[in-house]
Amino acid sequence: MARVVVDVMLKPEILDPQGQAVANALPRLGVDGVSSVRIGKRIEIEFEGSADLDRAQEIADKLLANPVIEDFTLRVEEEPALATADASAAEGGEQ
Protein backbone atom coordinates (compact mmCIF):
# COMPACT_ATOMS: atom_id res chain seq x y z
CA MET A 1 0.00 0.00 0.00
CA ALA A 2 1.22 3.50 -0.78
CA ARG A 3 0.47 6.59 1.28
CA VAL A 4 0.27 10.17 0.06
CA VAL A 5 0.34 12.88 2.70
CA VAL A 6 -1.49 16.15 2.01
CA ASP A 7 -0.51 19.12 4.18
CA VAL A 8 -3.07 21.93 4.07
CA MET A 9 -2.14 25.37 5.44
CA LEU A 10 -3.78 28.77 5.37
CA LYS A 11 -2.18 31.08 2.84
CA PRO A 12 0.38 33.40 4.45
CA GLU A 13 -1.82 36.47 3.95
CA ILE A 14 -4.78 34.86 5.77
CA LEU A 15 -5.09 35.52 9.51
CA ASP A 16 -4.67 32.37 11.62
CA PRO A 17 -6.47 32.92 14.95
CA GLN A 18 -5.64 29.41 16.23
CA GLY A 19 -1.96 29.96 15.51
CA GLN A 20 -2.06 33.35 17.20
CA ALA A 21 -3.69 31.85 20.30
CA VAL A 22 -0.95 29.22 20.54
CA ALA A 23 1.80 31.79 19.97
CA ASN A 24 0.32 34.04 22.68
CA ALA A 25 0.13 31.13 25.16
CA LEU A 26 3.74 29.99 24.71
CA PRO A 27 5.37 32.70 26.89
CA ARG A 28 2.98 31.80 29.72
CA LEU A 29 4.30 28.25 29.45
CA GLY A 30 7.89 29.45 29.64
CA VAL A 31 8.61 29.09 25.92
CA ASP A 32 10.34 32.16 24.47
CA GLY A 33 11.74 32.99 21.05
CA VAL A 34 8.78 31.85 18.93
CA SER A 35 7.69 34.64 16.60
CA SER A 36 4.65 32.97 15.01
CA VAL A 37 2.68 29.75 14.83
CA ARG A 38 0.53 28.54 11.92
CA ILE A 39 -2.00 25.72 12.35
CA GLY A 40 -2.81 23.37 9.47
CA LYS A 41 -4.12 19.91 8.62
CA ARG A 42 -2.37 16.67 7.67
CA ILE A 43 -4.40 14.21 5.61
CA GLU A 44 -3.16 10.73 4.70
CA ILE A 45 -4.54 8.99 1.60
CA GLU A 46 -3.69 5.31 1.16
CA PHE A 47 -3.77 3.87 -2.35
CA GLU A 48 -3.84 0.22 -3.30
CA GLY A 49 -0.65 -0.45 -5.21
CA SER A 50 1.56 2.55 -5.98
CA ALA A 51 0.99 6.16 -4.97
CA ASP A 52 -1.15 8.11 -7.43
CA LEU A 53 -0.09 11.75 -7.09
CA ASP A 54 -2.43 12.87 -9.89
CA ARG A 55 -5.46 11.44 -8.09
CA ALA A 56 -4.24 12.83 -4.76
CA GLN A 57 -3.89 16.27 -6.40
CA GLU A 58 -7.45 16.04 -7.71
CA ILE A 59 -8.78 14.98 -4.29
CA ALA A 60 -6.96 17.85 -2.57
CA ASP A 61 -8.12 20.38 -5.20
CA LYS A 62 -11.78 19.34 -5.05
CA LEU A 63 -12.28 18.28 -1.46
CA LEU A 64 -9.48 18.81 1.04
CA ALA A 65 -8.40 22.43 0.54
CA ASN A 66 -10.22 25.68 -0.10
CA PRO A 67 -8.08 27.25 -2.85
CA VAL A 68 -9.26 30.76 -1.95
CA ILE A 69 -7.65 30.70 1.50
CA GLU A 70 -5.50 27.54 1.66
CA ASP A 71 -2.43 26.06 -0.03
CA PHE A 72 -1.50 22.40 0.04
CA THR A 73 1.51 20.21 -0.62
CA LEU A 74 1.66 16.52 -1.51
CA ARG A 75 4.34 13.97 -0.69
CA VAL A 76 4.65 10.23 -0.84
CA GLU A 77 5.36 8.80 2.59
CA GLU A 78 7.70 5.85 2.57
CA GLU A 79 6.67 2.78 4.51
CA PRO A 80 8.83 2.27 7.59
CA ALA A 81 11.33 -0.57 7.42
CA LEU A 82 10.29 -3.75 9.14
CA ALA A 83 10.97 -3.38 12.84
CA THR A 84 11.49 -7.11 13.47
CA ALA A 85 15.11 -7.17 12.27
CA ASP A 86 15.94 -4.00 14.20
CA ALA A 87 14.22 -5.26 17.34
CA SER A 88 16.06 -8.57 17.36
CA ALA A 89 19.41 -6.80 16.87
CA ALA A 90 18.63 -4.42 19.73
CA GLU A 91 17.69 -7.33 21.99
CA GLY A 92 20.95 -9.12 21.26
CA GLY A 93 19.46 -11.54 18.75
CA GLU A 94 22.39 -11.08 16.35
CA GLN A 95 25.88 -11.97 17.53
Image (tube, rainbow, N blue to C red):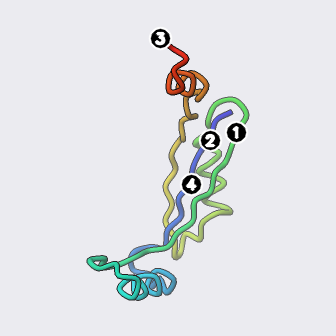
Q: Circle 3 is placed at which residue position?
A: 95
Q: Is residue 16 above or below residue 90?
A: below
Q: Is residue 58 above or below residue 67?
A: above
Mark with earlier residue (4, 1): 4
**Inter-mark Cα distance, 2 to 4:** 10 Å
| Residue 6, numbered label | 4
* Disc 3 versus disc 4: nearer the observer: 3
Q: Are marks 2 and 1 in contact (CB under 8 Å)?
A: yes
Q: Residue 36 location, x and y as percent?
A: 35, 78
Residue neighbourhood size for the residue with mark 2, other residues' Cα within 10 Å, grouped as few (<14), some (14–19), many (≥20): many
Assign a secondary structure to mark 3: loop
Assign a secondary structure to mark 1: strand
Q: Is residue 66 left or right of residue 25?
A: right
Q: Is residue 22 left or right of residue 64?
A: left
Mark with earlier residue (3, 1): 1
| Residue 3, numbered label | 2
Q: Residue 62 location, x and y as percent?
A: 66, 61
Q: Residue at x 54, y 36 (%)?
A: 78
Give the residue at the far right of this rendering.
Answer: 48
The amino acid type found where label 1 is placed reads: Phe
**Inter-mark Cα distance, 3 to 1:** 39 Å
| Residue 47, numbered label | 1
Q: Residue at x 58, y 42 (%)?
A: 53
Assign a secondary structure to mark 2: strand
